[in-house]
Image: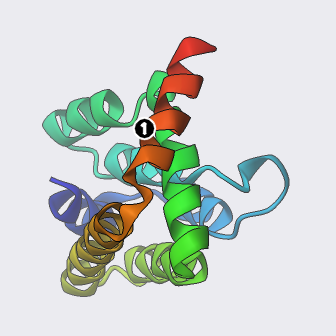
Amino acid sequence: IEREAARAAALRATPEEVQRLREIAVPSGADLHDRLGFHRAVGDASHNKQIQAIANTLFVERLDPLESVTLTVGLRRGVLGEWENDHRAIAAHIADRDADAAERRMFDHLDATIRETEAFVHGGWGDILLQQLRTAVGSS
């Protein structure tokens, strides 16, 4: 669904939404760990009610403990910078109205995220992620 969201956003995002995506894609200050917020914003910028509903269900703020999981995986695997570069590239493709490139980069981004997370878990670090999720859910 996210690759479709990126494609639709490239075709339909308003200039304000494009600017917001670019801002979120350059982490700083309070937005430093708002990776899920980027994905929510891409879904919103699609202007497709079904995609928006799915994106806002998958990436609601109550699931933000997943941010700590992706941060842990990204830092430990040394790929956090690559993921942030992916967000900047996706935002740039959306700004350029290049739907094919936006879709392809989103697919590659998610594929890399899944591969790195699986490698992290299979490398014996799965218990760390479970503990992080338990702690985050317990404090909510």
Mark 1 packing: few (<14 Cα in 10 Å), some, or many (20+)?
few
Viewer-proximal residue among 117 and 63: 117
User: Which residue is the extreme one toward the right?
Assistant: 29
In screen coordinates, is 48 left or right of 28? left
Residue shown at 57%/71% (left/top)?
Answer: 76
Which residue bears the numbered disc 1? 130
Residue shown at 21%/68% (left/top)?
Answer: 7
The colour scheme applied to this rendered structure is rainbow
In screen coordinates, is 50 left or right of 113? left
How far from the left and from the top, in percent, is residue 106?
29, 72
How far from the left and from the top, in percent, is residue 39?
41, 52
Could you tell me which secondary element the residue under label 1 belongs to?
helix
How far from the left and from the top, in percent, is residue 57?
29, 27
Name which quarter of the figure residue 108 lies in: bottom left
Quadrant position of the C terminus in the picture? top right
Residue shown at 30%/35% (left/top)?
Answer: 58
